[in-house]
Image: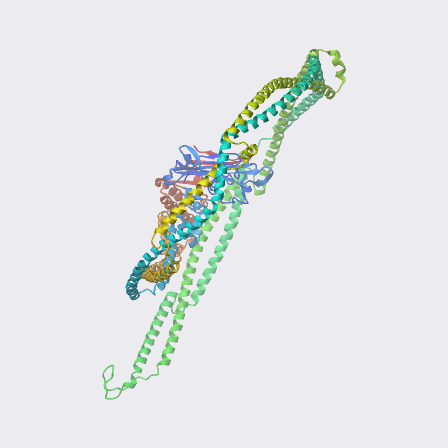
Amino acid sequence: MIPIKLEIQGLYSYKEKQTIEFDKLTAAGLFGIFGAVGSGKSSILEAILLALYGSTERLSDRGEKNSMVNLQSDLLLLNFEFSSGKNNAKTYLARYSAKRNSKNFDDIKPAEHTFYEKAEGVWEPITARAEEIVGMKKEHFKQTVIIPQGKFREFIDQKPLDQAKMMKELFGLERFDLSFKTGTLLKAVKEQKIRLETQLQGLEAFSEEGLAEKQSQFSELKTQATDATQKLKNAEIDVRLQENIRIKNQQLSKFKAEQESLNTQRPEIEKQRQLHAEFIKAKTHLRPVWENIRDTRADLEKYKVSVIDCERFKLEFAKEIEELEAQEAELKQKNQERPQRESKIRDLKKVIEIQSLESQRELANTKLLSLQPTIEAKKQAQKALEVKIAELESEAEKIKTTDSSQLANLISSAKEWKNLENQLDKLQAEETEIAKEVKEITAKIENLKYTIPANLGSLESWEMSQKSTIQELEKQRDGIIQKQGLAAHVHLLHNGEPCPLCGAVEHPSPLEGDAADGLKQKDLQIQEAKSLLDQIQASKSSNRELVFHLENHQKNGVAKKEELNGTKEKLSSVKASLAQEGIDSHKDLLSKIQAIEHSSQSREKLLQEVKTLRRNWDTERISIEQSEKELQQAQLKLQSVLSNISSKKEEIRDMAFCKNYFQKDSQAIFTTIEGVETDISKAIEALDGKQKLLRERRSLKDKNDADLENFKKLRNQNSERLDTLSTDYEALKIQHGFLDEERLTQLFQHSLDAEKVARDIADFDRKHDIAENRIQELEAERGVSKFQEQAFQELIASFESLKSNAETFQNQVLLLDKEIQEAIGKLAEKRSLQADFAKLEIRESYLKELDNMFRGSGFVKFVSSIYLKELCNTANVRFMKLCKNRLSLEIDDNNTFWVIDYLNGGKKRLLKTLSGGQTFQASLCLALALAEKVKALNQADQSFFFMDEGFGALDKNALRVVFETLKSLRHENRIVGIISHVEDLQQEIGVFANVELDPVLGSQVSYSF
């Protein structure tokens, strides 16, 4: 990650928007950010952390966000532009903004935290967060890229478990955590093995012997089933033949019954046949003429009635039209007076407008009378302000101007005086404490010397002597044990017989078996001697530790004394420089600072009051100008209103008619106008309505006259046609033999469905013919007339018995065949499962071995330890150079950091025993090594390293060595940024940004270029 630009507004002391141009600073490789204490240097790092991760080092985003926002600002805005990714090829923008609640000062609204990526010169929003973009969490970012104030030695102070966890998360070592995967695989294998065992248990009933037995049974059953099937086929042929004869016998019986039924229906069918013939003749030849006579007679009656109605309507229309014409003439006369009435309405509307203009004239007069005295009063007040401003400016000029640099120097000297005195007291107390501890350690060493025997002189001699004593006692115990072994064979010795060990035949003095008590006593002596040796070694270890502590305390005492002398010299130098200005004590210094500040505050107060009065004067001037503009507008308004009143009066045509209305209320005039307008509208609408109705009635009268003539004509035509049709009808009756009028009328009115009756007669004839033909055909066939139902049922029973027997054999064959096929499949499955089970047993043994190896994340811890050791080796390259090859770092198997002290024979001691400056050097080297590993991990061509303070614990020589180390990083393509108030660093670094705290504007950033 390489920073490009940071914009800060409203964060801590940054009141106004400030821009840190990192691209110009990082171009130098090594740059600094300097400023006084409290100027806002560290806030730059906190702004970067807040823009990336949404929280700062000092305050969290939740609950404490109110304290982040500048107390004179309503908005917190951060824009951080940076490059990241492989070779830092991509450019990103992190934006963080938060606003105060306008109704509650202490309430900060939820912050907006967004990220953008630059694509083809355009910022596009993205959903990725800082962890994904930068590639590390906030905690790791603070230990490898940006190290905030007071957090420089955080990595060293971490517990071994936390260090291993950091390596795991930072370098993705979780890929080596195979415990869960191995356990999952082992669990899956065990479950699969149990499943296979269950399946094999279910297949125990299947065997090769059982399969062979079933195959033998299958051959016998198949032969029996074939014989039964052949018998069934022969019987089935006989049954099918008898079934056909039976069906034909049933058909013969059916047709005979149908023939008898049709013979019963014949008389009725013949009667229907006669009626159908008469009905068809009447319908075809006579009914059309009869229907025409009936329709013509109905039309004749209809036209007679229509003629009577039209003659009556003719008289009514003539009377109604005469009345409507009289009403139309009356309404025309009334509408002719409309122009005169509309002219008077227009005059009355002008009266209302004149009344409104009179009201505006009165308002304009009132405003003119009120504005003139107000303007005069404001001008007098402005003159009084001018006099007051002149008096305050004269008083401020009398107060001497304060030298801000002198005041700053005095305040700085006061703080330095107080700090040096406090530091002096602290150093004196520490020196006294060190002397006290040296005395106590010396006394402890002397007490240990008193425990040493007088003839030995030292703990080492005493330890060697005690070890020799133990060796002698153990040698004696071995001799006793030998004797016990030989004494066990004494009972085998007899004079004249050879010894089983040496072969001698004489045994002058055989061993006695009473050495058991001697062995127990000797073991007790050895145990007491070893216990004393442990005490000697413990005393030796305590003495070595006390000597080590004594040497350290003596060195620290010398260093404290030198530091105490240096602090005294600094305090004397401060007092000497202040004595030249006549200041002899810290109290006098504070009094002088207070006097200068009081003078400055008085002058500032007067100038601020002048500034306030000037703003008031400007406000009053603007108010007067506004009032004068309003006065001019009111005068113009009055002239305009008077002109309009005169113009409106000239537009009135009948002034005599309107004169009485000037004194009336506008609403009453409006009511009069509305009444007249309503009456005019009604008269127009009434005339239109009458004329429309008159047109409709005249149209209806003309239509009625035309209908009357038409209906008379149609009446005469239908009368002539009726006479002609009656003559033709009588002639047709005689021609077709229908002399009985009543019988003919019945035929006309009969509801006979001729088509249906014809179909019924034809259907009867067809069925009768079919029945006779089929009876003759069936009686001629062999065996149909002599069929016996009982013999057929006996044949069916025999067939069903054979069918049942054949199906039984067939089912047995199918069932046995299915069992054989199932047995073959199950045996194949059993063999496959047994092979799989054997493979799973082998895989289970392998997985158990792996599970034991990876259990408890042991492999991850092992890899993490390798990374830490490699990190330690990389850090040692710089650390040994910084400490002139006197010290080196080492990490043990428990991930604990140790220091190898080459000035003390290469002995190890804890990293915590280093001094403050040495701890800073070790922390710096480890942080640089960690940043280098992260750079390689991210495949970046450049890396960035930023640290805040941390140089105060170094002397000038150590500071020079550290600074040269930081400058050398430029050759490694590394960018290093430093935040500090140490003046020596500011003189060494050529490219830097300077932060100053302005009382009004807040933190301001400037540059050395």
Residue lying at the far bottom of the rendered structure: 495
Q: How far across and how far down the image is residue 805, in percent?
A: 34, 63
The answer to which quarter of the image holds residue 337 is: top right
| Visual colour scheme | rainbow
Q: Left or right of 330: which side holds 218?
A: left
Say if 466 sits above or below 852 in the image. Answer: below
The image shows a total of numbered marks equal to 0
Residue occupying the point 45% across, 60% down: 442
**Does residue 95 appear in the picture of this structure?**
no
Query: As rendered, which of 1002 and 420 lies closer to the eye?
Result: 1002
Q: How far across and how far down the image is residue 581, in percent?
A: 55, 37
Q: Left or right of 34: which side holds 692?
A: right
Q: Left or right of 771: which side holds 379?
A: right
Q: Left or right of 512: which side holds 378?
A: right
Say if 200 sits above or below 109 in the image. Answer: below
**Does residue 672 appear in the picture of this structure?**
yes
Q: How far across and how far down the image is residue 321, in percent?
A: 67, 17
Say if 430 sits above or below 491 in the image. Answer: above
Query: As rendered, which of 39 and 974 lies closer to the eye?
Result: 974
Residue occupying the point 38% across, 53% down: 249
Q: How far across and how far down the image is residue 297, in percent?
A: 58, 26
Say if 611 sits above or below 158 in the image. Answer: above
Query: As rendered, which of 905 and 326 lies closer to the eye?
Result: 326
